[in-house]
């Protein structure tokens, strides 16, 4: 059974309501948490591409990416859990895992299921919740992976139509 039903959450996936790139995060992370995500990407065989600015490089170890000068460009890791769904991880802070998805790629029940599976994989791997906030509305999650429920759940009421 699906974690969430499209009819119940479609407003949270409307780019006009949420912004096209909602903020996803795992709080209380560490360098080890980041490395666990990198290891998960490799273990699951998800296609990925790591880059610093415009330069594409091999995926490094987390401990070599996170301690960088304040003026350095923020590295990112593009991960495709499926060919048509992209998540972009940004190595901004070792204390929080931060990534974006494009809501235009997450339309309909099938894509919602892929998204929920992805969040569940990350949450289970880390043993931590994974939250989704509207773009630019950090700290007000609308849905997320709940560790105790072992599924993605609603954390807010969808906006009215």
Image (cartoon, grey):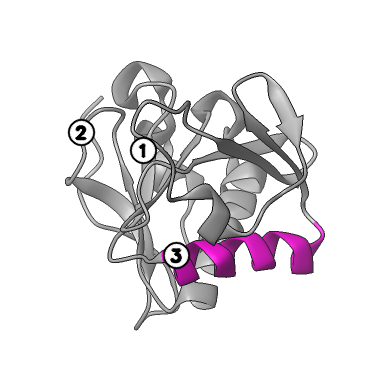
Taking 50 as reference, is 122 left or right? left
Residue with the mark numbered 3: 31
Disc number for residue 152: none
Q: Per the image, is 100 magenta? A: no
- The mark that comes first in sequence, 2 or 3, is 3
| Disc number lying in front (3 or 1) | 3
Specify the segment rendered in magenta.
31-45
The residue lying at 54 percent from left, 75 percent from top is 125
State which quadrant residue 14 falls in.
Answer: top left
Residue with the mark numbered 1: 23
Which element is circle 2 on? loop
Which element is circle 1 on? strand
Residue with the mark numbered 2: 137
The foreground one among 130 and 18 is 130
- The mark that comes first in sequence, 2 or 1, is 1
Q: Is 47 situated above or below 1?
A: above
State which quadrant residue 16 falls in.
Answer: top left
Residue 158 location (% of width, % of height): 25, 40
CA gap, disc 3 to disc 1?
A: 20 Å
């Amino acid at each position: 059974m699906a974690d969430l039903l499209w009819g119940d959450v479609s407003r949270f996936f409307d780019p006009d309501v949420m912004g096209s790139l909602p903020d996803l995060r795992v709080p209380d992370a560490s360098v080890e948490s980041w490395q666990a995500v990198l290891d998960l990407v490799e273990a699951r065989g998800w296609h990925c591409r790591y880059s610093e600015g415009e330069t594409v490089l091999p995926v490094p170890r987390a401990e070599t990416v996170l301690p960088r000068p304040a003026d350095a460009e923020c590295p990112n890791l593009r991960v495709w859990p499926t060919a048509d769904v992209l998540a972009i991880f940004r190595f901004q802070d070792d204390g929080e895992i931060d990534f974006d998805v494009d809501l235009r790629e997450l339309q309909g029940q099938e894509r919602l299921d892929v998204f929920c599976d992805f969040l569940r994989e990350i949450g289970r791997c880390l043993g931590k919740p994974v939250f989704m906030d509207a773009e630019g509305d950090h700290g007000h999650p609308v849905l997320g992976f709940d560790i105790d429920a072992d599924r993605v759940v609603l954390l807010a009421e969808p906006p009215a139509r």
